[in-house]
Amino acid sequence: MKKELYWLIVLLAIVLVVMSPALQNEFVNWDDEIYITKNEVIKKTPFSNLGEIFTYKINGFSVPLTLLSFQVEHYFFGLNPFPYHLNNLLLHLVNVFLIYLFVKHLTMSNLFLKIITPTNDSKKTKPNNPPPAIISHKTINYTAFFVALLFGIHPMNVESVAWATERKDLLYTFFALLAIYHYQQATAQQTLRLADKKYWLSLLFFLLSLLAKPQAIFLPILLLLIDYLKDRKIQFLLLWEKIPYFIISLLGGLYLLINVGTKVSAKTQDYDFWEKILFSCYQIGLYLTKFFFPFRLSNFYEYPIKVEGWYPIIFYIIPLILLGLAILLYWKFRNNKVVIFGVLFYFFNIFIFLQIFSVNTAIAYERFNYLAYNGLFFIVVVHLQKVKFTDYLWIGTLAYLAILGFLSFERCKVWQNNVVFFADMAKKNPNDIDANKIALKNTGDALMEKKQFIEAIEKFNQALGKDIKYEQAYLGRAFAYFQLGRYQEAINDYSHALALELTPQNRIETIFNRGTCLMNLKMYEQAINDFSSLIAVNPANVPAYLNRAYCLLNLARYEEAERDYRTVLQIEPSNAMANSQIQTLRQAKQKASQ
């Protein structure tokens, strides 16, 4: 027990060191603004708006537990990024520990050595030399340790840890692993009693996992795979015990279908079914390649561009390679339960994110593999234990693990801030217009935060060079012009943006900002028109009343100005500006009457 504790400490210490650069990261404008920095829902007192938390949708679906965790952090720490990243890292460490327990329990079965021994040719099995009935603690601990280590330090998992928003992955995996752990405990003796509290705790954690991220809908199938690996007999009770899991999963699946399934990315609407099959095969091929060789990672993997009606040849080769690999796996490992378990564990964890469903703006995302890769880690580690390790092989293995750790350590730094993050994104997607324009625009935003307005304008110019109808670049450049006092140029950009498709909130802000620029140029009549249009939409828009009143004062339309100030006081009786201006107008009237 002491030795196991020692190895656990070593395991967690390695993962902590490898992922530690994430603690220095800031928020980035890659959904962090939607989930955290500009999300008013999480800025309220924790648990005071549970109804809003549970119904608030981002990109079509709800992640209430994730938002609730952000809300608690915001209450105590505001928008200091360190606690958010610290909690992400701590969750990752807990998940590493849970993976260790998960794999350890899988390998504790008396059937395990028989399972990992090929049985496709029973004639070769010597009747007088049956496989051992038990597995050594050394084998169990080694398997659990190295699977958990690979999970903890693999570069493809950095995105889920170093990106604050991806608390979703960490939380859903945390609760999913707790659900699996309690299920394993409840079925430790092969027969599950429905009255066992571990069974009901497993169901509860499954529900919580779905509330953290809907990706957990395939957990019932993972439980069936665990039954298969443990050689549980298929009987009525085994299927009956899964019914509550599948009911919860079905409800989660229907929710996804209604809220996300029909929200196809505009980028992929024109792709036909066979193109989506090609993209899905490429996606799987990319993930498998990065599993072994996680180099040149990116937060955004661009879609291919057709040249003379054809995609790059790799898109036609990979389906053939995957087909050949599937045939080989079936021929060589069709009776190897570890391989079957690991492959299916991986497949069902990424299934809903394949490009067949076309819900993404990129062809692949690294974070989708966070839990899924453990199926492949399990296959590799189990079968490596059947290899006789020489000194050179040990050195090679340790060197490979060191490389993974170094790559993850450096990868964490990519999420350091907006400038570094989006520069990396643009560099690694040179042919993707969307990726480049988004990267350039967000780099401009980051420069704006540093008050480097001239440099920011140049980035917005480059973004508009990629897409002349990119409204966010117009808005960013307009605000930079505004900060520099170049109001006419700002007005031009705000007008360009208003001619494009803006969200209702962006449209309101754009009209207000244009009106403010007009006001600063003393173009009062035009400014009044903008502020009046806002008041027509929202009669309680206090800033619009105040600015319109200011314009009216400068046009000597005092009665109209006073009327606007009085309207402000009806909405906000303690408004200092309105009170002050009314007093000034009153004094002016008295002087005029004398």
Image (spheres, rainbow, N blue to C red):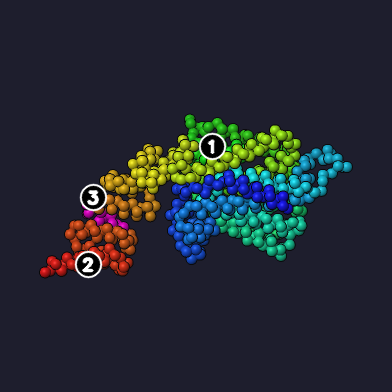
In this image, 419 relative to 111: left or right?
left
Q: What element carries label 2?
A: helix
Q: How far apart are marks 2 and 1 (CA)?
A: 65 Å
**Contact, mark 3 vs mark 1 (Cβ under 8 Å):** no
- Which of the 4 image quadrants contains residue 493? top left
Residue at horizontal 56%, vertical 58%?
211
- Which of the 4 image quadrants contains residue 388? top right
Answer whether residue 577 is visible to the viewer in this image. yes
- Location of the C terminus by quadrant is bottom left
* Crowding at mark 2 (Cα within 10 Å: few <14, some 14-19, many 20+): few
Residue at horizontal 51%, vertical 43%?
413
Residue at horizontal 50%, vertical 63%?
46
Q: Give the range drawn in magenta.
A: 520-534
* Residue 257 x %, y %: 55, 53
Q: Which residue lies furthest to the left in this view?
A: 594
Q: Which residue lies furthest to the right in this view?
A: 128
Query: What residue type is disc 3 on?
Result: Leu
Whichever of labels 2 and 1 marks the residue nearer the N terminus, that label is 1
Query: What residue type is disc 1 on?
Result: Arg
Q: Nearer the viewer, residue 395 or 115?
A: 395
Please identify, in this view, whether the residue under mark 3 or under mark 2 is nearer the observer: 2
Answer whether residue 344 is visible to the viewer in this image. no
Image: 40 above or below 411: below
Whichever of labels 3 and 1 marks the residue nearer the N terminus, that label is 1
Mark sitting on residue 296: 1
Q: Is mark 1 on a helix, strand or loop?
A: loop
Mark sitting on residue 521: 3
* Residue that carries the numbered disc 2 in the rendered image: 583
Whichever of labels 3 and 2 marks the residue nearer the N terminus, that label is 3
In this image, 545 relative to 278: left or right?
left
Whether residue 525 is in magenta: the answer is yes
Q: Distance between the residues labelled 3 and 1?
A: 49 Å
